Image (cartoon, rainbow, N blue to C red):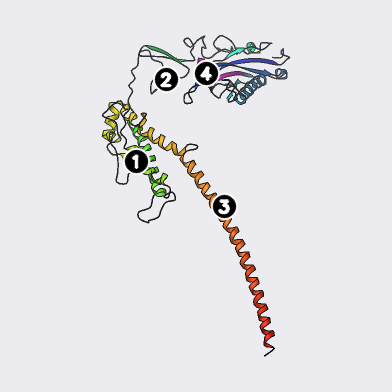
Amino acid sequence: FSGITSDQTFTLTLGSYYTDGNSISDTYKDSIYQRVNIDVTVEASVFSQTNDNVLADIASAITNAMGEALTTAVDYDGDSDDDEYILNNIDIVNADVVTEADGVSRLTLRSASSGYSYRMDFTDSSDELLTALDINSSSVSSGEAGGYITYVGSSLTDSELNSKFAVNGLTFYRDSNNVTDALTGVTLDLFNTFATPQSVTVSADVDRVKKEVQDFLDAFNGSIDYLRENAEMNPNTKERGALADDGLYRQMTSNLRSKLNTIVSNTSSSIYDRLFDLGIESDTTGHYSIVDSSKFEMALDSNTKNVSDIFNATDGIATVVKTYVNAFVKVGGSIDSSKSSLQDSIMQLNSRITYWDEVLAKREIQLRDEFTRIQTMMSQLSQQQSFLNNFK
């Protein structure tokens, strides 16, 4: 590297996704793919060192450029908010120096994410630093020669950076071996290659589904217990909860319980349209649980939508409970209104207290003045009486 006497700037071109803030839907934002150029500058003074130190400083320059890209805010989507960054953690390149022996080192570059979308492209510096390093070689790394470890290719279809698989005759190419969008509701983890087609059987994870349903019911039961303690009168102690005088909260218990007794109309099966059909019932304390596991498992084995629809349909149990509760907890909702109303009442009471404190203070002064005058008058009368007694 001794022949390089000036600063060297080369460019790494990397793949990156950003979220479009101008998407029509607030729930499903568009993810936009782009190629981003990152300039890396290595100062001239670096190249007068030993090769090991030169490689270490080049790796450091790349790391610094990645760090700057992670913290520099930009406005990719043109929504007037600098709410994106040049790169995200999954986009960056990790640079390391591997020392094979004393005086023998390699500079390695590895993308943080797999796949053709996250490939590295290079634009060399003026003195062809990358060429000298064999970093941008179009050949596979071998022996002392640099190059790529995995064939990059020129597209999704020929790049070995991607996973390639076929499902029911359709060929898929993905950046990762973890595939979530080939089959609806199914995640495929590809651990090996196969010479012959493999059969995949998809079945419901009964225990997991039961746990998720019971977790929902437990959370519901806990909410009912809290409301009974704080918004009702204890039948044993006759003590009233802190919220018992507010009709809004007194009604919540019965309103919430009525949601769980709802008949769901937007289900895919008319046989399964209420919790009872899934073996879910309440006990004498009003707590809900799966009391008939065989009934629940039968519904799930028949069709997973038998369970999911009852909870997640547009008028499903979880949906209506969430809508009802959200009216309370959202900004500007019932709880905020109650807090505001209570605060107003407190301010009014404080104002009344202040007013009556002032009235009583004035009355106290008035009474003290009157008492003083009476005392003075009594003293004068006493003196007059003593004077008159002298004439007897």
Q: Residue at x 38, y 34 (%)?
A: 320
Q: Closer to the observer: label 4 or label 1? A: 1
Residue behind mark 1: 257
CB-based contact (under 8 Å), mark 4 and mark 1? no
Is residue 370 found left or right of 170 in the rendered image? Answer: right
Mark with earlier residue (1, 2):
2
Mark with earlier residue (4, 2):
4
Q: In this view of the protein, which residue sits in the foreground, 348 or 158?
A: 348
Q: CA distance from mark 1 to mark 2?
A: 37 Å
From the top left corner, tell me how far across and down residue 184 is, in percent. 38, 21
CB-based contact (under 8 Å), mark 3 and mark 1? no
Residue behind mark 2: 181
Helix, strand or loop at label 3? It is helix
The residue furthest bottom is 392
Q: Is residue 114 magenta?
A: yes
Q: Residues within 10 Å of mark 2 (few under 14, many from 20)?
A: few
Query: What's under tag 4, amino acid-wise?
Result: Ile
Query: What's under tag 3, amino acid-wise?
Result: Ser
Residue behind mark 4: 32
Mark with earlier residue (4, 1):
4
Q: CA distance from mark 4 to mark 2?
A: 17 Å
* The magenta segment: 105-120
Q: CA distance from mark 3 to mark 4?
A: 57 Å
Q: CA distance from mark 4 to mark 1?
A: 44 Å
Q: Residue at x 26, y 30 (%)?
A: 298
Mark with earlier residue (3, 4):
4
Q: Closer to the observer: label 3 or label 1? A: 3
